[in-house]
Image (cartoon, rainbow, N blue to C red):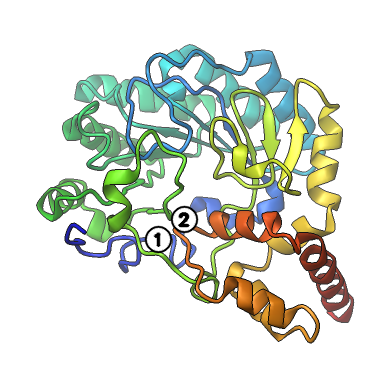
Amino acid sequence: MPERPADYVVDAANRNLAAEGVCFEFPNIEKIDILVTFRCNAACAHCITRSHPKRTEWLEEREVLDLLAVGAEQGKRYTSFTGGEPFLDFPRLLRCVRFAKQKGYFVCADSNAFWGVTDRRATDWVQRLVDAGLNALFPSADHFHLPFVSLDRVRRVVEACDRVGLPCEVNFAPGPDPTENERIIGALDLRSRGYFCDGLELTGNDVSGFLHLYPQLSPAEMDDIGSMHMGVGAGGDVYANVDISDDGAGFHGTPLLLGNIRREDLTSLFVAERERPILALTRTRGPREVDGWLRAHAEIGPGYAARFADRRYYSPTAYWFDLFHAPEAARYISALEAWNTSSASVK
C-alpha cells in the first residue's frame, strides 16, 4: 500500500472537526443543499456525483425556485447551490441567489473557482454575488481539481472575497503528494484560515487510487452529524443526507430517501424529513452515540456488536447505509426511534 501522507482529515486545521463555519450555525432541519447540475468543467476523481463536462443534467430554474419557496414555508433558513459546477450558468445562479435571499435564506454557493481568470473578473463576479444576496462562498482547492483549475484562479477568488468582505471557506481534500498538499495549503493560507475536509464517499469517478489517504474509523470514533441535512440532486431526488451520489444507489431502501420533486408534492417531502422519527435521531445523534446505545441494548446489543465488531468507515454516511441495509435494520430503527422519543420526553 502506498505511504500515507500527513493526516489532513483529522488535522487541527480541518474545521469540520470542531463543527466551525457558517453551515454549522444552523440546525440540520433548517438546511437544504441544491445540486443544480451534474455538469462540470472538471472531472475530479473524488467527485461523489461523478460530475464531468459531458453530463447534461440540470434542475429547471422554476424547479429550484419552487423548491426554495416551499422550503421557506416549511422552515428552511439556509441553502447552498452546488453541483457539479453551478457557476457554468452564472446569470441563472444570480437569479437563484437573489430569489433565495428574498425568501429569507442565508445563501451560499460551492464552486471550483474556474472563473477566477483575472483579479478583475474574480472581483466583479464576487461583487455581483454579494449584490444578489450571497452570504458565503465555498471554493474547492486540492490535488484533484488542479488538472482542471489552476491554484491561481482559486487564490484570486479567495482574495476577491476577502476584499469585499464575503465569508469564504475553502474545501480541501488530501492528495497523494504531501509537498503538493502543503503548497496548496500555503498558497491559500489554510493553516490560518482553516479548511473543510469531509470523509470520503466511495461513489466518485475513480477513488481506487487514493483510499489510503483517508482514515477508516469505527462508529465509536465518529461523532459527525454535519451531513444529515436535506440534499436535492440534479435529477430531482431528495435525501435527508447531503452526501448524495448521482444515482443515489446507497439511499434506496433506507429512510434517508425522501422522494423526488418531479413526482411528489413538494410540501410532502419536507414533512417527511421533519416527521420521520428515525430522521429526528440521525439529525442530532452521531454514529458514536447510536453505536454505543445499540451495543448496550439488552436484546439487540449482542447481535449488533457481533455484526459491527470490526467494521470501519470512510464517512458517517457509510455507517448509516450499513446500518439501514442490515438484515436487522427494522429492529434497529424501531428501537432507536423509541429511545429517541423517550429521551426527548425526559428533556
Q: Are marks 2 and 1 in contact (CB under 8 Å)?
A: yes
Looking at the picture, does residue 41 appear above or below residue 222? above
Asked whether residue 283 appears in the rendered view, the answer is no
Q: Which residue does the image show at 30% across and 66% down from the upper left?
A: 11
The reply, left or right, for residue 295 in relation to residue 155 is right
- Foreground residue, 185 or 234? 234
In the picture of the structure, the residue carrying the numbered disc 1 is 15
Q: Residue 210 location, x and y as percent? A: 28, 49
Where residue 158 sits, quadrant-wise, is top left
Disc 2 designates what residue? 21
Residue type at the position of mark 1: Arg
Instruction: Name the spot of residue 127 as percent of width and height, x first.
Output: 39, 26
Location of residue 110 by image quarter? top left
Identify the secondary structure beneath mark 1: loop
Front residue of this view, candidates 115 and 101: 115
| Mark toward the start of the polypeptide (2 vs 1) | 1
Q: Quadrant of the N terminus?
A: bottom left
Label 2 element class:
loop
